[in-house]
Image (cartoon, rainbow, N blue to C red):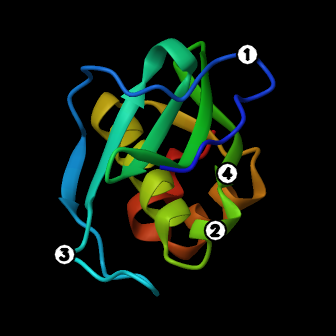
Amino acid sequence: MRSHPSPPDGTTDAADSRQPLVSRRAPPYPGCMSESPEVEIVDAAEQGRFELRVGGELVSFVDYADHDGRRAFPHTQTYPEFGGRGYGTQVVRAALDEAVAAGRSVVPSCPFVRAVVQQHPAEYGALVA
């Protein structure tokens, strides 16, 4: 398993007993010699982010902060070795879907989150505060 540095705020990426929002098999990736690993997306509320894990390994996350009924998304990250596989989009869409379900408006201050909202205006356009 690869090890990634902790985010600047000192939090860790250790998995815990949170229930995944999404759990499914990942598409095969270059160099994969076995069955596709399991993809899980969880709301790591104590760290203020949604996390996407593949086979238990943190691959991508989107940070959030809640204020006055709105959810701001200031940052998204996918570790470089996992780039180009759609993991960033998956974790952002899961986070936006959760905002829809909770009836929250969103502040997409992260350019990547803003791009996902713009690419899917029917689902997320009305959420933007």
Residue on which disc 2 sits: 81
Residue on which disc 1 sits: 10
Q: Position of residue 48 (x, y in %)?
A: 56, 22
Q: How dense is the environment of label 4, judged by Cα within 10 Å: few (below 14), some, or many (20 and up)?
A: some
Q: Which mark is residue 44?
A: none
Q: Nearer the viewer, residue 49 or 111?
A: 49
Going from N to C along the chain, the mark reached first, 1 or 4, is 1
Going from N to C along the chain, the mark reached first, 3 or 4, is 3
Residue on which disc 3 sits: 35
Q: Quadrant of the C terminus?
A: top right
Q: Quadrant of residue 65?
A: top right
Going from N to C along the chain, the mark reached first, 1 or 3, is 1
Residue 98 is left or right of residue 37, and the answer is: right
The structure residue drawn at horizontal position 75% and vertical position 49%, both measured from the top left corner, is 110
Q: Is residue 70 above or below residue 86?
A: above
Of badges 1 and 3, nearer the viewer stands: 3
- At label 2, which amino acid type do we have? Glu
Q: Nearer the viewer, residue 39 or 95?
A: 39
Q: How dense is the environment of label 2, judged by Cα within 10 Å: few (below 14), some, or many (20 and up)?
A: few
* CA gap, disc 4 and disc 2: 12 Å
**Callout 4: SS:** strand
Q: Quadrant of residue 12?
A: top right
The structure residue drawn at horizontal position 26% and vertical position 23%, both measured from the top left corner, is 18
Residue on which disc 4 sits: 77
* CA gap, disc 1 and disc 3: 34 Å
- At label 1, which amino acid type do we have? Gly
Q: How dense is the environment of label 3, judged by Cα within 10 Å: few (below 14), some, or many (20 and up)?
A: few
**Callout 1: SS:** loop
* CA gap, disc 1 and disc 2: 22 Å
**Callout 2: SS:** helix
